[in-house]
Every structure is written in structure tokens, then in C-alpha cells.
Image (tube, rainbow, N blue to C red):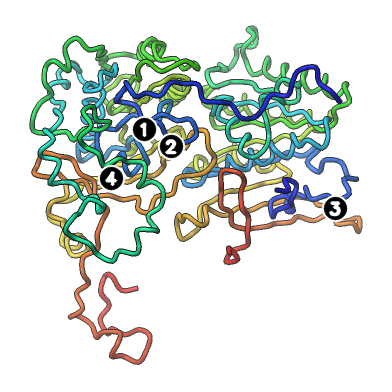
Amino acid sequence: MATSKPRTSSFSRNLATVPSSTPGLKYGPNGTIFISSGIPDLDKILGGGFPLGSLVMVMEDAEAPHHMLLLRNFMSQGLVHKQPLLYASPSKDPKGFLGTLPTPGSSKDDKSRDRDPENENGLRIAWQYKKYFGDNQHHFDSNRDVKHEYCHDFDLRKPLEKHFISGQHIDCVSILDSPNLAALRDCCATFLAQFSRNDSSISSAGRIAIQSFCAPQCKYSNMEWDMLSFIRSLRSMVRSSNAVAVVTFPPSLLSPSFSRRWQHMADTLLSVRAILDEDKEMAKLLTGYQDMVGLLNVHKVAHINTQVPVILDATTFSIKLQKRRFLVLESLNQAPIDCSSGTSYGTSASCSGSSKTGTLDF
Amino acid sequence: MDQRAPNLLDEALGLVDEEKTKPWPLSSRVVLVEDRVETSGAFVLHHLLKRALSPHSSNDVVVFLAFSQPFSHYDRILRKLGCNLTAQRENNRFFFLDLLMSEFPDGDEGNNDGLVALYGKIEKVVSTSFQENKKCITIVIDDFSLMEVAANGATNYVLDFLRYCRTLTSAFGCSLVVLNHEDIYSSIERPALILQMEYLADILIKAEPLATGLATDVHGQLTVLNKEIQDGQGSSRNKICNFHFRVKENGVEYFYPGSKT
């Protein structure tokens, strides 16, 4: 049966211009465009960064402020790339938070951190397992001499230079006293309207950072369905714009069912946990325990425009502050097992070798 | 590549039909797809969409209620699976209702935006298609938990909507496919909503992670419960299948545990 219209091909050329002039954007697979999270290791783990149009949720640990590290780097990265920012927090004066944002570290500090095995000149090991690393290593050019970097290493001890903050499009909203979420919803809608997605080239990307969304001091914090409805509308608005929204919340303050609903809404779901200062069991299990500030778990990674889930090799990472300045995420390394406590498996004939079971025996 | 090559999911659903003599096996049936945060069941919807819009017959119509993702998302995914949603939409075989920003406040029966009006729209499309001799109509809802949020938690309101949609399956022989997240309800003391949906469903497809965690080779396991299959001797029985799956860009591999080559 003939149709009057010519059959459109299922292939279409991607007509958006290459963002070579916009250093804050990077092309990803399936037509997604990434912006950096502000933490180089996190970008690497997530396969490029946060895709535009996605909602990132960070589950806080009520006992530690590590989510603030993620938020600060996210916001600073946006300001350095001149991407407009909307920041909402339950404090009376959210603008004050801008003074705590870190500044990009100078590039000569980066050379000593370069752990990329390709660049280790003097060390050539017969490392045959490189072929199993997979594709996500290749996304990154290790060319750090590029003037406008996609992701900066932020120095958490130095505040962001004034010229990044003044004259920038930054909206700060306090959600402490608002009785409902209508005002915040309108703020977000107005902000996101400037980044609405159409097929022409992208001028800029927007960032929304909402801190401690269900904090108990906010008046709306017991209106569970209203908060959920706000997150749904934020997600839908962000979907159709060139922006990324990062929302942090303490899941312990929500009922389990609602916490699950929030987790399902997120495209990228992270959680941060505190580490006790003195935990002898942990210290025995992991190397470098003393340097760890906390743990970061990646529960879900955004996969927009594709049905293939992103499965990571490791989902738990330790948060460390290198030189007490730079935020670094490392995969956990198990400490060498102390073999002196039981009989070794080699000398015993039976399957269960050691007479004394340690915590790592299985 | 033979796009009609049957796989374990098709066999479990009864979609394997060499002679094409039987009508669409999902007609007049309600399919509930359940998933969790760790394992998404959206690929089952994409698979059913592709099967429903297969090019061998022009009698198929799909009404898609999208609460979760915009059209561009499904378009890109189905394109890689070999189905052109844009063309199907233009040919009036694929009706996409973008409900991402819609709200359905309870009790607002007077205005045009409530669930009653939404049901009216669906019913009109279904009955018109039925009169045009398009017998295989599928209604897909992605996903039901977001519909609850849109209705601000009015569970009875959305359940009524679901029951009304179910009447369409018996009146017009269409099939109803709904996606919901099972782990939201498992932590409530009396998970009435999910139990009612499981009761209403004729086919239950559950996507779960493996007990041993996540892996790159096996993305999870699928359990398909097919109620009341006629097994040819006049009696009916339930059939349960369980197998593993791996999701790829151009399709999904299904295999029995341990048989991944």
C-alpha cells in the first residue's frame, strides 16, 4: 500500500553544532551532552559527567556534610564555565554559601596527580589486563594543556575568586520559610526556560543545586506528596532543557516507601557516608584508611536515550582529600590478609583450612 | 538479522507463532511489569512496543501514556531496535500522550484535565481504531508510580482509572501494559495498591537483580507468570518462567541461568 508521503529514513544527521567554543560541554553517546561535576574522578566514573536533561540525587548522611563537597565542586565548576546557576538551600542567607566555593587549583599541582598509566614513562609493566578495561577509559583526553578545561581540580582551601561570582547569573533562593513549594517551582521554571531544548545549537547550559531538600526545618518538610510532586515537575522540566539539577536529601528523614520513590525519580543516584575516625575493623580491611574522609556509593548512572544500563566495575569509592585540598575518589583496596593467625590452606588437607576463622574467611 | 526470531520472553508470553493463525496473544489481557531501583524493567516495554508495532500487519495501534520520558527518548531507543516511532506516529498507529507535566488533582471532575478526561481521550482513540478494523490495540502506561504522584497520592482515583482502562480490554479486546516499581510498595505494611494490580494482571513480568549483585554479563533476572494458559486439553493452568537477561542497544539477550555463551 503506497503512502503519499515519502518514507522518512530512520537515520537523521545530528545538526547541532559542535561545542568546540563552549568548553563546559562534552559530547557523549546517544546524543547526550555532558557537563562536568567538578570532580575529575567522578566524571570518569560516570562516563563523562552529568548528561544535560538529567536529575542527579545525592543521599546525604545525616552525620556528615560530605554532600556539601559534591555540591561545592558542582557549583564552582559551573561558575568557572560561566554557566548560570540556581541555588536553593534551607539556610536564611544562601548567598553566604557562595563564599565557601573552591577555586580551581593551579595546573602545576595536577602533574603529580596524574595517575593515568599510559603516561607513566619510566614504568613499563607487562600489563596484559589493559584490554579488559573497556570503553569508558577512552572518553578522556589526557591532554591537560588545553586552556579551557572541561573539568577543573578544585582547591578546597582557597575560595573562589570574586570575578567568577560577580556579574554572573546566580539566583539564590532560601527554602526555609516557604509554606509550600510553589515559589521554588516557579523559580525553577523561570530559570529553566532560558535553556529550553530545541534542535539549534546550545548556547549555554544551566545548573540547579538544591541542598538538603527535605530538611526538617523547612515548613513543607512533612508534606510528602507535595515534595514528591515538586521533584517530578523538576525532573520533567529538566528533561526538556539543557540543564542539570543536583538535589541532595537525607533519606533517613523520609519514610522508606517515599525514599524509594525519590530514588526512582533520579537519573543518577549517589550516596555519601561518613567514616568513623577510629574503626579498627575497617582499618584492617582497607588500605589508606586513615586518609579517607568518607565513602561515596554510585547506585544508578543516568542512561538517557538508551535502554542499556550502566554497570560499573565498582560502586563504592573512598573520598579523600589529597594534600588536604583536592577531592579525590578512589576505589577501595583490600588490605593484605594477615596470614599469621590461622593455618594456611596449603598445608591442610581438608577444605576448611584455618582453625581460627577471621573476618575475611569465607 | 531476523527480527522475528523468538526468544525466551516471547515464548513465555506466547508470542511465538509460526503460522500466524492465532490472534495477538496479548489481546484482552493485562500485563504488569514490575522492576526495582537496581534493575529497570523499561526494556520489557520497549520489546512489547516493538512487537506490537511489527510491520507484518497494519492493524496494530498503540496508545502510549508517558509519565517518565519524552518522545525523543523512546524514538531513539526503538530506532535501534528497528522500529520507527516517528513514522508510526504519522501513520496514526502510535499515539503518544506526553503527560510529563500533567497533574491530576482529585475531585476536579469539572475541568478538562483530570483522569476522567484522560480516560475519555483513550477510549475515543480505542473505539475509533476498533471501528476502523484495527483489532490489536495496546495501551501502555510508563509508569504507574508517577501517575500516583501526578494525582497527589490519591490511590483510589488512579486505581479507578486503571479499572476503567481494564474494561476496555474486555470491550474492545485491547491489551493493557503497565509498568510499576515494586520496591516502593514492599516497605509499606499493607501494600494494597501493588496487590490489587497484581491481582488484576493476567501476566506478571518481574525484573529483579541477581541475588549475587550486579554484573556486566548478566543484567538481571526476569520472572514471567502467565495466568490461565489454555493448554489444549480444555483446562487452564498458570505458567511461570524464570531466566536471565542482558540488555544491549539493539535488543535483549535472554538465556537460562548458566547458559550464557
Residue A122 or residue A72, whichever sits in front: A122
Same-chain check, marks 3 and 4: no
Quadrant of the drawing holding the N terminus of chain A: top right
Query: Dot 3, crowdedness within 10 Å: few (<14), some or many (≥20)?
Result: few
Whole-angstrom CA distance, mark 3 to mark 4, is 51 Å
Gap in angstroms between the C-alphas marked 2 and 1 = 8 Å
Residue A224: x and y, percent?
A: 42, 27
Helix or strand or loop: what does disc 2 sit on?
Answer: loop
Label 2 to label 3, Cα distance in Å?
42 Å
Choose mark 1 or mark 3, whichever is in front.
Answer: 1
Q: Which residue is mark 4?
A: A296
Q: Residue at x 73, y 24 (%)?
A: A7
Q: What numbered label is drawn on residue B230?
A: 3
Same subunit under labels 4 and 1?
yes
- Cα separation between marks 4 and 1: 16 Å
Residue drawn at 26 percent across, 12 percent down: A169
Tally of numbered discs: 4
Along the polypeptide, which appears first: circle 4 or circle 1? 1
The residue indicated by pointer 2 is A302
Residue at image coords 67%, 38%? B82
Q: Residues within 10 Å of mark 4 (few under 14, many from 20)?
A: many
> Are discs 2 and 1 located on one and the same chain?
yes
Q: Chain of mark 4?
A: A
**Mark toward the start of the polypeptide (2 vs 4):** 4
Task: Check disc 1 and report the residue beneath it.
Answer: A50
Query: Quick one: label 2 or label 1, which is nearer the N terminus?
Result: 1
In the depicted structure, whether residue A335 falls above or below residue A48: below
Say if A157 sits above or below A317 in the image: above
Tell me whether circle 2 and circle 1 mark residues in contact (CB < 8 Å).
yes
Q: Mark 2 belongs to which subunit?
A: A
| Mark 2 in CB contact with mark 4 (< 8 angstroms) | no
Q: Amino acid at mark 3?
A: Gln
